[in-house]
Image (tube, grey):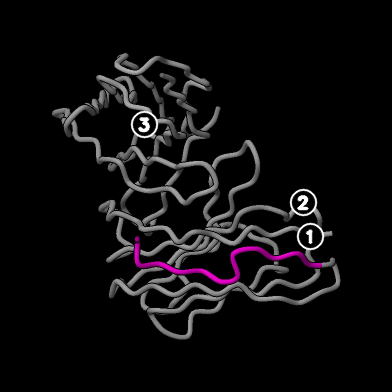
Amino acid sequence: RKEVEQDPGPFNVPEGATVAFNCTYSNSASQSFFWYRQDCRKEPKLLMSVYSSGNEDGRFTAQLNRASQYISLLIRDSKLSDSATYLCVVNAGGTSYGKLTFGQGTILTVHP
Amino acid sequence: ETGVTQTPRHLVMGMTNKKSLKCEQHLGHNAMYWYKQSAKKPLELMFVYSLEERVENNSVPSRFSPECPNSSHLFLHLHTLQPEDSALYLCASSQEPSGSGDTQYFGPGTRLTVL
């Protein structure tokens, strides 16, 4: 089983649509969770951290379910500029020295 | 920009060549990382350095040799690579290398092709 598994996508949605990405992780000891965004041929950049209580940043909402080891990202009112690969990222914490484990990514294309 | 720079941005080398990748961070961070991103595969952590000391070697072959002369600079020395080592090599830095999940900031990467 992959340590971090994401919807493979690709997702093709019209501007203004709402789209949701899912992610599961296998290590129950994982402590920190993130969504990164990676544009084509660019480096990954942090989109948002994910907290147990859920958190929202503008059009983006992230949820964490520790019992199910499940993370989600919801994007409302999609913009063309949201087109990118979204990476689910997990940190095992403890003595794992900042070791981030990345999912394979979900490709999102927003079209006019 | 993220404050992490990498050179060169593109590199083509033969299997018998020796080359080095360079990473520099201007953020005052204490931890630096090397990752490998191959086509259609997740990013893979290769090495972690904390205050110039290597704290993680993720089962990387010895043909990859990291060097961290100070907390701002990180090198990846390459020797006798294989074609399957062709990938995007990303450097990242964070304030601390702890498990608390400090944000990691990535450089633009070096796209390596091994012929």
The subunit carrying tag 3 is A
Relative to B68, A89 lies left or right: left
Identified by mark 3, the residue type is: Asp
Does the magenta-highlighted stretch encompass residue B23?
no
Does the magenta-highlighted stretch encompass residue B3?
yes
Q: Magenta-highlighted stretch: main secondary structure?
A: strand
Q: Earlier in the sequence, mark 2 or mark 1?
A: 2
Label 2 sits on residue: B84
State the image quarter where residue B65 is shown.
bottom right
Residue B20 x/y as whole percent: 65, 76
> Mark 1 and mark 2 in contact (Cβ < 8 Å)?
yes
Identified by mark 1, the residue type is: Val
Reply above or below: A45 against A51: below
Q: Name the residue rendered at 24%, 25% in the picture.
A: A63
The subunit carrying tag 2 is B
Residues marked 2 and 1, same chain: yes
Residue B61 x/y as whole percent: 70, 62
Stretch in magenta: B1-13
